[in-house]
Amino acid sequence: MKHLVAYITTGFPEKSFTVDLALALGENGVDSLELGVPFSDPVADGPIIEKANFLALKKGLRFSDVLELSEQIAPKVDTLWMGYFNPFYQYGIDALLKKAKEIGISGMIIPDLPHEEAVAYKAQFDANAISNISFVAPTDDDARIKKVVSDAKKFIYLVAYAGITGSGQSEDLQPIITSIKSHTETPVYVGFGVNEKTAKEKVTGADGVIVGSAFVNVLLQEDLSLSQKIDRCCAIASEIKQKINE
């Protein structure tokens, strides 16, 4: 069974909504949840997720709110934090990883912390049994892929193209998936540009997909009620989970 990871922006459009949506997604095909930590300069994200980040911060969301909401979600849905390094560093890496373990967070996805810098924190992640998710991009050669994935935990985040999330570009991923799988048995999940239309193609040769902008786009639709947003996101999740396992 291929894996579906869903990204949602924490605290948007409301804090309590995040919990309701997360638990509903977990009941509709989502295997793991990325709780996005809103940040003022989300460099790897496209305009959809960037806007949701901005609106969540504008409403006053703080990292303490992310912790509080995570405590309600992580016991029921496999949960990772997706965020940029600065808020994590400001909190204190040791304290953060201990808190993550206490809450039940299984991993962290930090797109602006390259492998060469992430190794400095490996012992701290390992000591708390938190996976620091490894990224591989289509521009990486085989030697770099081998280095990045040699000790990858939980899953490998394969960026479907060189760019930002949600822009829908396409790459032939089969050569790079073959390269990754020649060096590790850690599952490979494809992210960036994955939605109901592209999921079946993107998952070819991989072990799962990561979907973000397709969900957050629904959250930004002002003509939908909160319950309608949950229903629409759950329908997307169910459809994608079915398509990647056909």
Image: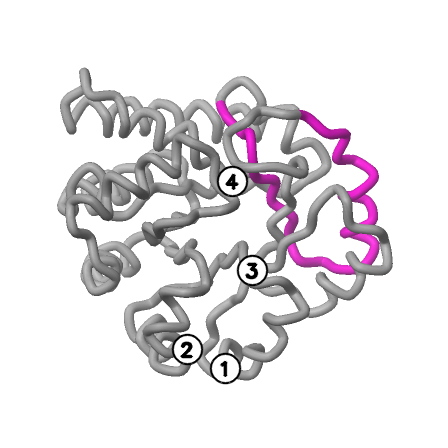
Q: Tell me the SS state at disc 3.
A: loop
Q: Disc 2 to disc 1, how far (Cα)?
A: 8 Å
Q: What amino acid is found at the position of numbered circle 4 in the picture?
A: Ile
Give the image location of residue 168, x and y in percent: 57, 24
Q: Disc 3 to disc 2, how far (Cα)?
A: 15 Å
Q: Is residue 201 left or right of residue 44?
A: right
Q: Is residue 167 left or right of residue 178?
A: left
Q: Disc 3 to disc 1, how far (Cα)?
A: 14 Å
* Residue in the foreground of this view, choosing between 145 and 120: 120
Determine which of the numbered discs, if any, sits on residue 210 in the image: 4
Q: Disc 2 to disc 4, how far (Cα)?
A: 25 Å
Task: For marks 2 and 1, give the one nearer the viewer.
Answer: 2
Q: Quadrant of residue 29?
A: top left
Q: Quadrant of residue 239?
A: top left
Q: Tell me the SS state at disc 2.
A: helix
Residue receiving disc 3: 133
Q: Disc 1 to disc 4, how far (Cα)?
A: 26 Å
Local packing at callout 1 (Cα closer than 10 Å; few below 14, some 14-19, many 20+) is some
Q: What amino acid is found at the position of numbered circle 1 in the picture?
A: Gln
Determine which of the numbered discs, if any, sits on residue 93 in the image: 2
Local packing at callout 2 (Cα closer than 10 Å; few below 14, some 14-19, many 20+) is some
